[in-house]
Amino acid sequence: MINKIKLLLLILILILPQIIWADLNAAKKTQKAAKINLAILPFTAHNTNPSYGKIIRNRIEFVLCKLDKFNMLEKNMTQLIFWKHSIDSAQISDIAYVVKAGKDILTDYVIMGEIDKLIDYNITVKIIGVRENKIVQVASEKFTQEEKIYEAAQKLAGKIEKFLTDIPPEGLPSFTNFQEKTYLSLQAEYLQPIKSFKELFKAGYGSTLSFGLKNLLTYNLFLGISSGFYKFAGQNKDNSSNLVPLMAEAKYLIKFPGNFSFVPEIGAGICHNHLETPQKIEKRLEPLAKAGFKLKYNFRSDLYGSLGVSYQNIFEKDDNLQFLGLGLGLVYLF
């Protein structure tokens, strides 16, 4: 049974790159086929001709429509929905009102903006994420002459298009603009010695603390550092072993339908081994390798619960210390 588990984990390590590659390619194809729902509000004008706001809004809409990447809500329908919510020009600046109306029209993003003039003209655009309930991006463009208004609006449309096509539909990755996040993980583990280690020690327990970055190098890849404390009682009550591992770790999250994810992981580092017997006390640093996988459940977008299995091997000159782990933990993203 133990050999089968070790073989399964070895196969997992060998095929992990292929799993990541296949998962990313599948998500790319799905993302390419998806269209983003978009609504553009009238632009407000300050200290300049009020018609410039309409010109900019219409030009941005025209350019984005021609790209055939977005489901655009027709201008009159947009105005009707926002009128229904009694949103006037003063309330347009309140993101809560805009998000409320955006949810009603089932749009993903709302574009709003303004043009003002002091010496030069300046157009400012805000992209409101309806799911995110906040401004997700801003952009601006300056020009000096009135006849440059179409050119400035076209440049802004290009910035909007680049940003929005880099944002994934819900549940899918962005491959050019993903945001790195810091993760912190705490896990409690039940540890079962195997092979020669089992002859000397009983089942033990431990905990590990990990931190690092999610979305480093590619989407859903976790790279970080973990450390912990493992304690084993000897088959002879006078024996004990305390282990303090320090490892670099790599994990990749593969989403399942719903809130579940599958996370294969590998790690390597060193382990401080404190071995105590009636005859002697030994302290030594030894190399350590780990492989395993976890099943994770999303409580929230920034909080996971996990249940995992791992195999760990401490390399010694005479023999290896091998054990299996069953862990229960939490992962927080910030």
Image (cartoon, helix red, strand yellow):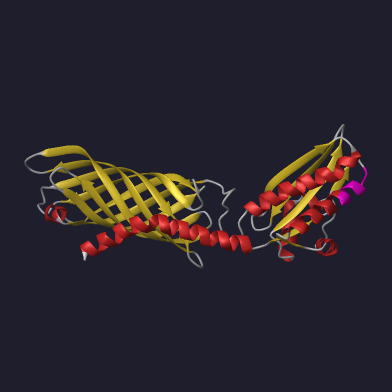
Residue extending farthest top: 119
Point out residue 214 in the picture as x, y percentages from the top left corner: 48, 48
Instruction: Please tell me in which quadrant of the rendered image residue 316 appears.
Output: top left
Main SS of residues in magenta = helix
Point out residue 12 in the picture as x, y percentages from the top left corner: 34, 59
Residue 265 shown left or right of residue 242 in the figure: right
Quadrant that contains the N terminus: bottom left
Instruction: Please tell me in which quadrant of the rendered image residue 168 appears.
Output: bottom right
Q: Is residue 227 visible?
A: yes
Q: Residue at x 27, y 43 (%)?
A: 244
- 218 relative to 25, above or below: above
Q: Is residue 171 visible?
A: no
Instruction: Please tell me in which quadrant of the rendered image residue 102 appears.
Output: bottom right
Q: Is residue 240 magenta?
A: no
Point out residue 38 in the picture as x, y percentages from the top left corner: 73, 59
Point out residue 140 in the picture as x, y percentages from the top left corner: 76, 41
How many discs mark residues in the rendered view? 0
- 62 relative to 119, above or below: below
User: Which span of residues is magenta-colored?
Assistant: 49-55
Residue 135 shown left or right of residue 287 in the figure: right
- 251 relative to 151, above or below: below
Residue extending farthest bottom: 257
Residue 94 shown left or right of residue 331 in the figure: right
Q: Is residue 50 magenta?
A: yes
